[in-house]
Image: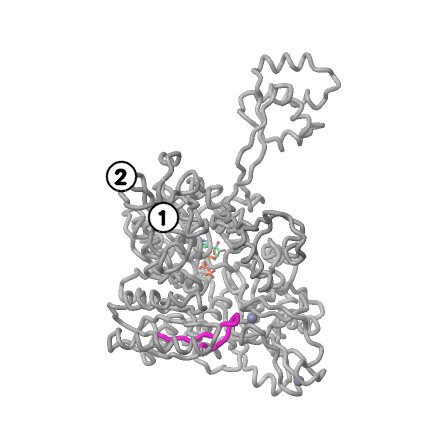
Amino acid sequence: MELAEILVDVPTMQTNQPYTYQIPTFMKEELQRGMRVVVPFGHRKVQGIVMNVVHHGTFNGRLKSIDSLMDLSPVINDEMYHLSFWLAQKTFSFQITCLLTMLPSVMKAKYQKLIKLLQPTHNQSINDIFHGQKVISFNSNSLSDEQIKLLLKLKRQKKIQVNYVVKNQAKSKKEIAVRSKLSKHQLKQALEQIPKNSVAQITVLKFFIQHYDISSVKQSFLTKLNHVSASTIKNMQDKGWLIRFKVEQYRNPYQRPIKRNYPLKLNYHQKVAVNAITRSVDQQNSNVFLLEGVTGSGKTEVYLQSIQKALIHNRTALMLVPEISLTPQMVNRVKGRFGNLVAILHSGLSRGEKYDEWRRINNGNAKVVVGVRSAIFAPLKNIGIIVMDEEHDDSYKQEDAPRYSTREVAKWRGKYNHCPVVLGSATPSLESRARAGKNVYHLLKLPERINHQALPQIKIVDMREQIANYGVKNFSKPLLASIKEKINRHEQVVLMLNRRGYSSFIMCRDCGFVLKCPNCDISLTLHMSSHTMRCHYCGHEEPIPTKCPNCGSKRIGHYGSGTEKVERELQQLIPEAKIIRMDVDTTRRKGSHERILNRFGQGKANILLGTQMIAKGLDFPNVTLVGVLNADTALQLPDFRSGEKTFQLLTQVSGRAGRAKKSGTVYIQTYNPDNYAIRLAETQNYERFYTKEMGIRHAAGYPPYYFTVRITVSDLKEVRSAGEANVVFHYLQNHLSDQTILLGPTQSTILKIKRRYYYQIIIKYKREKNLNSVLSHILMNTQKDFRRGLRVEIDPNPLKFI
Ligand SMILES: Nc1ncnc2c1ncn2[C@@H]1O[C@H](COP(=O)(O)OP(=O)(O)OP(=O)(O)O)[C@@H](O)[C@H]1O
Ligand SMILES: [Zn+2]
Ligand SMILES: [Zn+2]
């Protein structure tokens, strides 16, 4: 019997292994591993992925048959197939979740439950549900409990029918193309016979005579010719002269022309780095390099020339960048070097565009992929090099299932493809730098800026003193003076308002009431542009209150300074300044990010004021001053990485100043001028920071001296989540070794999110051989309570401990 083993899109522990289905005869030739199919499952239909085709299988009993094929060729290739086993195990997630994560989101099927009313009725309650339609799609949110009860009753009485539909959302865009059905001679004959006033048809005939050697042309091209319209072509088709047919079209998100650029002559340190990396490319070994290069040292050029080497060997290349540094400048540098071989994957693309780029990669038309975290799953074949720029960036860790670390996946793919992985940063993560210290990674250094330009001079400003002595708000005296000076000299300024761990909230000055989200245990954030209060966790929105909901006082105002408020203040202080603001509000529209940076690059403003968004990757030669308005917001977070994150951010943003001929200055405004992370950022000496921070981590028993796992238990009822957290804790205590440290269970810092109560346990360990089996056991055991609302999530090496 021909059988197929299929993983179904039902993420539960019970379905975490393939189910066997019969292959219908008509599908036998086509079906292959890695294709998406629709299969019956219980009383529903679901999407599934073929994991195995068994040609002469035996099975006693009745097997269901595959319903239909969603793909004509596999969408999960061999590498992704193998990767999914490893990923599921490493991240404690379901294999189907891993597989679907690797694919563009349009390839995840949309499920619809359709309800058909079998006979018309005069019953008002029924008609209130169907509104005169015969078929409606079932949506439990828009129906009341009464209505759902009624539908169940109608189903028992066989008065309605329920159908499940699995919709394939992956559709390529089609375009009409045209070709001639006539020979050249026949075309000429037609031209002679046609009346002289059929101008449009004559134009088309002439076109095909002149371009007889081309096989077809897009209709949209023909309709740009004089007088020619779609109906002209349709007419000529009816006469039997032309044939119209559909072709697939790729959406191209980068329509603008990009200036070509060429390899630069490398300086000594760059050369050493490129040589070491390209030797690995030549020898096809999977070394991991840590490229530690100060800001403006030319890391990108090292990446590009190493990638070039992979292409020469007819291999492909993957370059990962954090979302915020995938700037138009970066795109131009890579596309300008490798042209149409480049595919770009970032979150600004529409779902359709992402799908098109994915197909260009999958069919081998794109050989260099530049993208954010999820691009680590780009279906490149025969990879010759993987680059991870700004390897320390938090966005490389996925926070939802599967909670993977991009770096670990990159290393897995490096091994599979026999190619090097290059991790680059001015401020590497402690984990990576420690591995380089133990020679697990090869350390390469770029200690100097290009052209021996000095690093900018950094000045720390004590804001406590500024406020006490001068009553300033957001701009200290020295920073303000320096901004004015730069504007007079026609140089540019970058100002950063650090928003990490910081928000503008509303508080009543009389009773202290703070407006909180009804679903979550956190305060709502003020958004001036939409005039709403918004919850950053669940998206809840409500109007800005004009009086206190608690005591009725009108003295309710907002605290904290958003970028908009700071912009207004600065404009008042320096009326002649031209300021461009860059934050989530001004970059929401597609392409706005690029427009803002272009305007600044063209010198249309003196000041770029923004959030962390502006800290990375920007390379503007005329920027000579950087101001950090509030360095310390992140320092107050109860997170052992807060020092590391502060140092990294300050170093990155300082690096935007003085990158070309003119030297740079940086002002860092802080309330904690003696904090070690800020002091060390002043010297911009990463190695010194590394040594100091490692000492602290060692003393406190934090990573990289320990590995960590975070387990969160949540439920709609607080007693249940607390109770279950205790059960899990005792199980861990009894099954893990004595050297392992368990913290908790405690309430998470934000106890309540989206109406769920969270409790957490942290595991710290150095070596723990039972870890995988113990954690899998916990997942398996808690699954049975899933339906009651209990959820247990496991995050290996988490970034957040709060
Ligand atoms: N060998 C070279 N000769 C001349 N110019 C170079 C060379 N290498 C790089 N550059 C230029 O130096 C500038 C800084 O380089 P790049 O942006 O690659 O640095 P980076 O190390 O990635 O910086 P950051 O980490 O601060 O973003 C760029 O404008 C780049 O074009
Ligand atoms: Zn009040
Ligand atoms: Zn909320």
- Alpha-carbon neighbours of circle 2 within 10 Å: few (<14), some, or many (≥20)? few
Q: Position of residue 309 (x, y in %)?
A: 36, 45
Q: Residue at x 60, y 54 (%)?
A: 590
The answer to which of marks 1 and 2 sits earlier in the sequence is 1
Q: Which residue is mark 2?
A: 56
Asked if residue 62 can be seen in this view, the reply is yes
Label ID, residue 6: 1
| Residue 473 located left or right of residue 416 | right
Q: Main secondary structure of the magenta part?
A: strand
Q: Residue at x 57, y 76 (%)?
A: 523
**At numbered mark 1, what does the secondary structure look like: helix, strand or loop?**
strand
Q: Disc 1 to disc 2, how far (Cα)?
A: 16 Å
The image quarter containing residue 706 is bottom left
Q: Position of residue 68 (x, y in %)?
A: 44, 41
| Residue 122 located left or right of residue 726 | right
**At numbered mark 2, what does the secondary structure look like: helix, strand or loop?**
loop
The residue closer to the viewer here, 168 or 692, is 168
Q: Which residues are magenta?
A: 748-762
The residue closer to the viewer here, 609 or 771, is 771
Image quadrant containing the N terminus: top left
Q: Is mark 1 within 8 Å of ligand 3?
A: no
